[in-house]
Amino acid sequence: MSPLDSAPLDVLDAYRTCEFVTLGKDGTPLVWPTAVRRRPDGTLLLSTSLAFAQKALNIRRDGRVALLFSDPTGSGLHQPPEIFVGGRAECPDEIRTGPQGAEDYWRMLFERQPHSRAYVSLPLRRMMAWYYLRLLITVTPEQVIVREPPEPVAGRLAERIAEPPRPNTLPGAVQLARHSTAVLAARDDSGAPVLARTRPVPADGGFEIRVPEDCTAAPGPASLLVHRHDERLNHMHNALVRGELRRDGSTWLLVPERVVEPMGTGRPTDAWRVLRRTNRATARYLERRGLPRPPVQWNEFRDLVTELKRR
């Protein structure tokens, strides 16, 4: 029996992305959207490119992780339950240059994100090679919580949300205002990461949030993630607001400190900046380990794309 057996697996499998949190070196829960493939043995398979290897480095230092399936965009589901999974992760320092051992994962990506198939074509290979140099992450679930979709807000909170936005100098105010909800990443009393989707509301000195009763968040380092993608996992954007979670009676407040936007802010020039940054980060990962840049197994990836096109 796996803890996942208590979850609606058809719903979990339908989610195109989930929010995945690891613990930074200073203990801050760092959460980003990612794609997940459920394995028959009850574990969850994720991956990260060398360009965004911080998740892997965090896991090798502290394997406690959590996932939240809460954004149903592209899933075909209408108001599905949210699924929280807490557990432990492993990420060996083995660079995968082809799909071997993760074929189902890559089939899922190529099927759900059709534009990524173009990356294996000759014109884009040199530019996108960093995308295919991957580290595999295996999560063993230990806890599962199924939550009903957030209920419509009422009363004073609904009035505050409906108010026209006012000028706000808090870090992250602009990014959070573009989304109706955000994902809170915090820690419980044991230091393990927890996740919950919530509605941040600007308040004096921070963002007031509501924490579900089954989310055992404790005061301390925390972050808020907002992200979006379309039905085909295109036009992605994400922003992380890092700060400190405080509690005053029944009121929770996230006091922001800084904002991280790894994919840029949406300007036309962001794509080129991201490409330069990812290629440099990939080279840095390899240089620190004294490794040459391994060749991508383009033929194997191309065969998977061809297989999908024939279906």
Image (cartoon, rainbow, N blue to C red):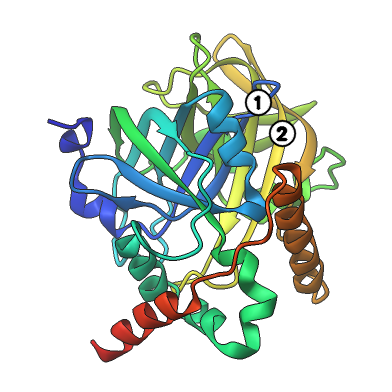
Question: Where the N terminus falls, by quadrant?
Answer: top left
- Of residue 263 and residue 154, the one placed in the foreground of this image is 263
Which numbered mark, 2 or 1, is in the foreground of this view? 1
Does any portion of residue 133 appear in the rendered image?
A: yes
Q: Residue at x 74, y 68 (%)?
A: 275
Q: Position of residue 25 (x, y in %)?
A: 68, 24
Q: Is residue 3 left or right of residue 66?
A: left
Does any portion of residue 172 appear in the rendered image?
A: no
Disc on the earlier residue, 2 or 1: 1
Secondary structure type for disc 1? loop
Q: Which residue lies under the disc numbered 2?
A: 242
- Of residue 204 and residue 85, the one placed in the foreground of this image is 85
Q: Amino acid at mark 2?
A: Arg
Marks 2 and 1: CB-CB under 8 Å? yes
Label 1 Cα crowd, 10 Å radius (few <14 / some 14-19 / many 20+): many
Secondary structure type for disc 2? strand
- As drawn, the label of residue 28 is 1
Cα distance between the residues tagged 2 and 1: 8 Å
Q: Is residue 151 left or right of residue 246?
A: left
Q: Amino acid at mark 1?
A: Thr
Question: Where the C terminus falls, by quadrant?
Answer: bottom left
